[in-house]
Amino acid sequence: MKITLVAGARPNFMKIAPIIREIKKTAIHNPELKYRLVHTGQHYDDTMSGNFFRQLEIPEPNINLCCKGSSQAEQTASIMMGFEKDLILNKPDLVLVVGDVNSTMACTITAKKMNIDTAHVEAGIRSGDMTMPEEINRMITDAISDLYFTTSTMATETLIKENISEDKIHFVGNTMIDTLLQQMKRIQKPSNWSDIDTRIKGYLLLTLHRPSNVDDPIKLQILFDIIHQNAEGYDIIFPIHPRTRKNIETFGIETYDIKMIAPQGYLEFMFLLSNSIGVITDSGGVTEEATVLNIPCITLRNTTERPETVVIGTNELVGDEPLYLAQFMSKMLNGNWKKGGIPEKWDGKAAERIVSIIQDKYANNFQPEKEVEMTETI
Ligand code: UDP
């Protein structure tokens, strides 16, 4: 059986790493299980891509599609064009995508139009916010996939409500957490830690990159104002996403004494997160990691596609109401945070379950090779 795995952007790499490790382990006893790794090139530089491959020991991709385009449509089209060629040449039995980035949706559509089965890891999560590009990616991917791997029973229920047949859905846990648990013993200080660590009192970690927070200059400035005004003298460390840096520079945002550092490698980011007093973020992945590490987490969004991080974990949705952000920062800095628990099956074994299910489902798909061709347009 041949599986093509797709990864394109930073949040994909920690989700795909444990799946590749598990496939390699399984292939020792089952050499017919073969994989091909396609990097779409959505994130391309070392800080957002290369470093994650090295730190998480992800093998070199078999191909990088080097997708182009600055708009959503250009990027999606470019990924689809490159991926179609790769599928024609390599004819997999299954395409496996993770998460909710443009590559996830683009590669699912491309494969399905060539009658190739697709599996979606992290299926069924929904924010209900159709202004998020990720929500559209999630819904389209889940509307047409063949196999669904979910991180929660809530995600499974969502898929059932959307009329996906239950035998296609598998609640397996969270591959992002597989990576976290595997890598915790290797976390390391950022290389410029002595510059960062000027005070011993403690620090808050900040990450921001969603268009809803960083594309409007007034909103972005207000966020910095409130965070600065309510930090109670604690340091704020902000590994800054390239998109956010660009906007801060273009808009001339006042960032006060917030310590802006380059995007961190995975091991350094986990060091910063696990040693922080709390994190203020608009990332989905960070809310899951903070939950497992029992670190207080403020999410600067009105909705989340990961409700278990709020109901069970340490996450609080604060939206964009300045008063709430100030109140929650005060709770965080004064140690008045709720106690969190760990969601079911976030136990480091999600990838093991995924590969075992794929093996069972496709046990009969070893040879002969499927005919895969470009379907004609109408
Ligand atoms: N991350 C990292 N370095 C950073 C910021 C984030 O390694 O400087 C990791 C972290 O594990 C996080 C993941 O990247 O969970 C996803 O980040 P991002 O916010 O880009 O994506 P999202 O979760 O919002 O889809």
Image: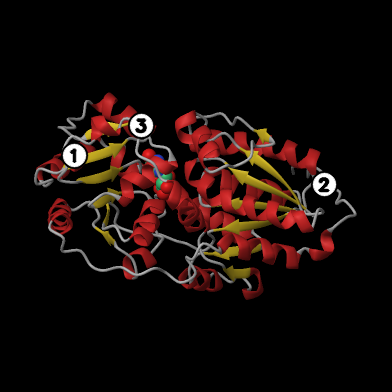
Q: Which residue is mark 1?
A: 224
358 and 217: which is toward the camera = 358
Residue 372 as seen in the image, left or right of residue 179: right
Image: 377 above or below 116: above
Give the quarter of the image for residue 334. Answer: bottom left
Q: Nearer the viewer, mark 3 or mark 2?
A: 3
Disc 3/disc 2 C-alpha distance (Å): 48 Å
Give the quarter of the image for residue 94. Answer: bottom right
Quarter of the picture for ligand 1? top left
Given the current orientation, which residue lies at the most extreme front position?
Answer: 185
The quarter of the image holding the C terminus is top right
**Model colouring:** secondary structure
The quarter of the image holding the N terminus is bottom right
Q: Residues within 10 Å of mark 2 (few under 14, many from 20)?
A: some
**Residue 191, numbered circle:** 3
- Earlier in the chain: of badge 3 and badge 1, it is 3
Q: Residues within 10 Å of mark 3 (few under 14, many from 20)?
A: few
- Earlier in the chain: of badge 3 and badge 2, it is 3
**Residue 372, numbered circle:** 2
* Residue type at numbered disc 1: Phe
User: Which residue lies at the image location 51% right of the left edge and 40% below the top edge?
Assistant: 55
User: Which residue lies at the image location 55% right of the left edge and 33% below the top edge?
Assistant: 74
305 and 292: which is toward the camera = 292
